[in-house]
Amino acid sequence: FTSTKLDYSYIVPHGTNASLLSLSSVAHDHHGVQGSWTYDSANHKWSVTVTSEDGTATKTYTVTINVLPSTDASLKSIQINGTDVDSFLPTTLNYTVDVVHGTVIKPSDFVSVANDDHALQQPWIFDPFTGRWVERVTAEDGITELIYTVTINELPSTDATLSGIKIDGTDLSGFSSSASDYTYGVVNSTDMS
């Protein structure tokens, strides 16, 4: 600080409410009159005016508050097809999700929400080399980055039905996969072995 310099900058951590900072100062001449520090929220500046003892000179000192950008690149949730990923935690980066046999997952099936509105989320993409879906999230600072992955585990099929029955190469008439008992008429003395 020098008394001839009127404008200053001060850096504060992300999330600091600049209007709640407490600024104080002492006039160089103890007979001078120093006003109160006031905050201009539109310009993020604190200012104070000092008037000389005789009232002929005034100086206004300003301190511009620069809030550092967020370093939060975490997600607050991941959903696949409208269902929350079980046991999701912002600090856990890798997940495995079971899906019903035959489910096809597309990028549009993923919805994720960043903890910080200023974080940049890349679209979910499938990495064929790892077999995982990947989303890259970059914090407001442009440096901090987290990569979330989801491995889709397609459960085995539970279908134990037939799609058809043939007898001597002919489709069984009236077949339905929901029925399990059938009667088939044959000519007397037909070999059934």
Image (cartoon, rainbow, N blue to C red):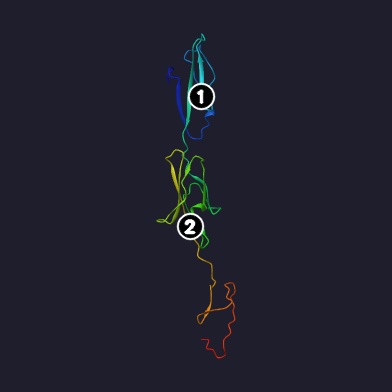
Work out whether 51 lies above or below 91.
Answer: above
Query: At which x and y percent is residue 58?
Result: 49, 14
Query: At which x and y percent is residue 168?
Result: 51, 82
Residues at badges 2 and 1 in contact (C-beta under 8 Å)? Answer: no
Query: At which x and y percent is residue 155?
Result: 50, 62
Residue drawn 50% across the image and 25% down it: 45
Inter-mark Cα distance, 2 to 1: 53 Å
Work out whether 158 lies above or below 39.
Answer: below
Task: Examine the image and state in which quarter residue 188 appears.
Answer: bottom right
- Residue 152 shows which numbered tag? 2
Residue drawn 45% across the image and 26% down it: 9
Disc 1 marks a residue whose amino acid type is Trp
Of the 4 image quadrants, the one containing the N terminus is top left
- Residue 46 shows which numbered tag? 1
Residue 38 shows in this picture: yes
Disc 2 marks a residue whose amino acid type is Ile
Q: Residues within 10 Å of mark 2 (few under 14, many from 20)?
A: some
Work out whether 149 lies above or below 59.
Answer: below
